[in-house]
Amino acid sequence: MKKVHSLLNSKQWDIGWISLGIILVIISTIISSNGNITLTTVTSFLGSIIGMTVVLLANQSGKFATGLGVVGALFDTFNNYMFGLSGMMFVGIYAFFIYLKGFFSLGKQIAVTKVTKSNLIVSLCIAVAGGILLLTYGSTILPNNAPQWVIYCNALVFIIQVVSQYLMVEGKAIGWVGFTVINVINLCLQSYVYISGANPAALVYLAMTFMFLLNSVKALVLWYGFGE
């Protein structure tokens, strides 16, 4: 287990993770474009690369990572709107404001601060309000004739994202369980969008989400297997 811990915390793992991610994103971009480069193809490629870079730098450079996160969140919002995934579009909007706040409040290095009960209450209110809004109106931008499970998962990802974000900042390992669940749901949603033919560029985000899933599993192993 010590060898596993050492590997997951090593630069070799980070280099291997980001390298594999870039390769998968390039391959998925080529496959999904099929020789026809569209705006969504370009924004999906850029959004995926930026998203993985932010994850890689998240625990290293507060100011730079959150600044890059602001840009990535804008790409995510646009791309998920184009995919018809309103839940993830809301996640992008939510992440934009989180990263923007972090950019102006964090120093060059990330310092974890105590989150108050009021923060939790606000997070839960946002999650519930967003979930209700998505269940009521979110299906209007989903791919045509989306099955019921897609509609429910579309709202679920936003609810879990908001709660998990709070738990992660609070320093609770269970937050990574939420992110793992989100990534699994996203893989299902993006697969549906791609297979249904609604937007082939969803394949690019499918590759990125797979890499996010690997990262959340890594975090679970470290936090649960080696936490104090």
Image (tube, helix red, strand yellow):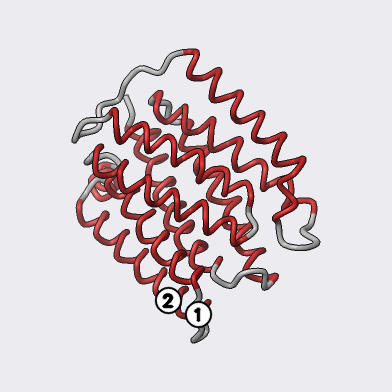
Residue 82 lies in quadrant: bottom right
Say left or right for 176 vs 191.
left
Q: CA distance from mark 2 to mark 1?
A: 6 Å
Q: Residue at 37% of width from left, 50% of height from top?
A: 71
Say left or right for 225 vs 80.
left
Say left or right for 85 vs 41.
right
Q: Which residue is mark 1?
A: 31
Q: Residue at 23% of width from left, 45% of height from top?
A: 6
Where is residue 20 shown, x and y percent of the image? 34, 66
- Contact flag, marks 2 and 1 (Cβ < 8 Å): yes
Q: Amino acid at mark 1?
A: Ile
Q: Which image quadrant: the C terminus?
A: top left
Label placed on residue 220 = none
Q: Residue at 44% of width from left, 41% of height from top?
A: 96
Q: Is residue 56 above or below residue 25?
A: above
Of the pair 154 and 80, the residue shown nearer to us:
80
Of the pair 87 and 140, the residue shown nearer to us:
140
Give the class, few, some or many, for how many residues have Cα within 10 Å of label 2's Cα (few <14, many ≥20): some
Mark 2 falls on what kind of element?
Answer: helix
Give the class, few, some or many, for how many residues have Cα within 10 Å of label 1's Cα (few <14, many ≥20): some
Q: Is residue 85 above or below residue 32?
A: above
Query: Residue extending furthest top?
Result: 117
Q: Which image quadrant: the N terminus?
A: top left
Query: Residue extending furthest bottom?
Result: 35
Q: Amino acid at mark 2?
A: Ile
Where is residue 121 shown, x and y percent of the image? 55, 17
Q: Which residue is mark 2?
A: 27
Mark 1 falls on what kind of element?
Answer: helix
Q: Residue at 72% of width from left, 53% of height from top?
A: 150
Q: Is residue 105 above or below residue 74?
A: above
Of the pair 3 and 118, the residue shown nearer to us:
118
Residue 144 lies in quadrant: bottom right
